Image (cartoon, rainbow, N blue to C red):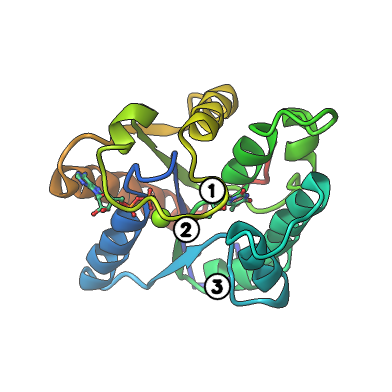
């Protein structure tokens, strides 16, 4: 890309426990970016539309059971199968706003506390995937998320499990993450997220190289 005149787009990721507001903020961010004339698309993982995604969907809806390592590998494969398209989009100037990624993958599988499926093993299957240019972590205690609507009947939507997930996010976190207080209003959060995204888009325009998970 260094020689072309198309500047790459950014990969903006939202992470956090269930009901912290990821999907709400992703949608609003894409709308704000588009209204500013910035090419942006909303993506989510799992992408339930692919063949692998349909297997994941059945698992999440408890229509099918699966070995814990096998389902982890499917979630990871669901990211790998979209990797080339992700890079093509970004390199053609599109900013991707993504709802969950490998951070969810590791935080959720490791929350099962199954022997061998520790954080290091969970991370390893995603190593080398494109890394986000900005990770926006919506921070909220699990108790607070319980006051919100939206818990469905899917497999991982259990309070104790979510607490384990939150602990794993904390273990994965580092200084590069942008922590937002998810108890703020939707509008305030949108303003903060937009600022983070615009900064990341600017850096990418200036030629910032794409990173790799979990370098
Ligand atoms: P997630 O995708 O992280 O599970 P959602 O965006 O679906 O979360 O939001 C979960 C619920 O909380 C929805 O009913 C949504 O309208 C509501 N919600 C989202 N953000 C806020 C906020 N900042 N303040 C209050 N309620 C919110
Ligand atoms: N999830 C999501 C995983 O367990 N591993 C992953 O790699 C990803 C991307 O799937 F319970 C879990 C997290 C959540 C569910 O729910 C997806 P939403 O409501 O579609 O985000
Ligand atoms: Mg959501």
Number of the front mark, 3 or 2? 2
Which is more N-terminal, label 2 or label 3? 3
Please identify the quadrant where the C terminus is shown: top right
**Mark 2 touching mark 1, by CB under 8 A?**
yes
Q: Which residue is at the front of the view, 37 or 101?
A: 101
Number of the front mark, 2 or 1? 2
Q: Residue extending furthest right?
A: 116
Does 92 sit left or right of 201 as displayed? right
Does 122 sit left or right of 193 as displayed? right
Q: Position of residue 160 (x, y in %)?
A: 51, 29
Which is more N-terminal, label 1 or label 3? 3
- Tell me the SS state at disc 1: loop
Q: Which residue is at the front of the view, 143 or 209?
A: 143
User: Label 2 neighbourhood size at 10 Å, few (<14), some (14-19), many (20+)?
Assistant: many
Residue at the spot of label 2? 98
> Is residue 84 visible to the viewer in this orientation of the structure?
no
Does 183 sit left or right of 210 as displayed? left
Q: Position of residue 201 (x, y in %)?
A: 39, 55
Residue at the spot of label 1? 132
> Is residue 111 visible to the viewer in this orientation of the structure?
yes
Q: Could you tell me how far apart the alpha carbons at marks 3 and 2 are, in whole angstroms?
A: 13 Å
Q: Could you tell me how far apart the alpha carbons at marks 2 and 1 are, in whole angstroms?
A: 9 Å
Residue at the spot of label 3? 89
- Tell me the SS state at disc 3: helix
Residue drawn where x is 29% and y is 31% of the image: 144
Q: Which residue is at the front of the view, 174 or 73?
A: 73
Residue drawn where x is 67% and y is 43% of the image: 213
Q: Quadrant of residue 53?
A: bottom right
User: Label 1 neighbourhood size at 10 Å, few (<14), some (14-19), many (20+)?
Assistant: many
Q: Could you tell me how far apart the alpha carbons at marks 3 and 1 are, in whole angstroms?
A: 14 Å
Q: Position of residue 172 (x, y in %)?
A: 59, 28
Please identify the quadrant where the N terminus is shown: bottom right
């Amino acid at each position: 890309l260094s020689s072309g005149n198309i500047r790459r787009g950014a990969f903006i990721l939202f992470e956090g426990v269930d009901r912290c507001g990821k999907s709400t903020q992703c949608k609003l961010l894409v709308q704000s970016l588009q209204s500013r004339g910035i090419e942006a698309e909303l993506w989510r993982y799992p992408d339930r539309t692919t063949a692998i995604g349909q297997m994941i969907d059945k698992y999440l809806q408890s229509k099918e059971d699966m070995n814990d390592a096998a389902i982890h590998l499917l979630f990871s494969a669901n990211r790998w199968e979209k990797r080339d398209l992700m890079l093509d989009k970004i390199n053609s100037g599109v900013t991707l706003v993504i709802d969950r990624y490998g951070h969810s993958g590791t935080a959720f599988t490791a929350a099962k506390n199954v022997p061998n499926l520790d954080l290091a093993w969970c991370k390893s299957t995603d190593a080398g995937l494109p890394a986000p240019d900005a990770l926006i972590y919506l921070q909220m205690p699990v108790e607070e998320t319980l006051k919100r609507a939206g818990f469905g009947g899917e497999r991982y939507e259990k309070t104790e499990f979510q607490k384990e997930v939150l602990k794993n996010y904390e273990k994965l976190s580092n200084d590069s993450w942008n922590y937002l207080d998810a108890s703020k209003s939707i509008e305030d959060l949108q303003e903060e997220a937009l600022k983070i995204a615009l900064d990341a888009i600017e850096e990418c325009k200036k030629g910032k190289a794409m990173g790799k998970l979990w370098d």
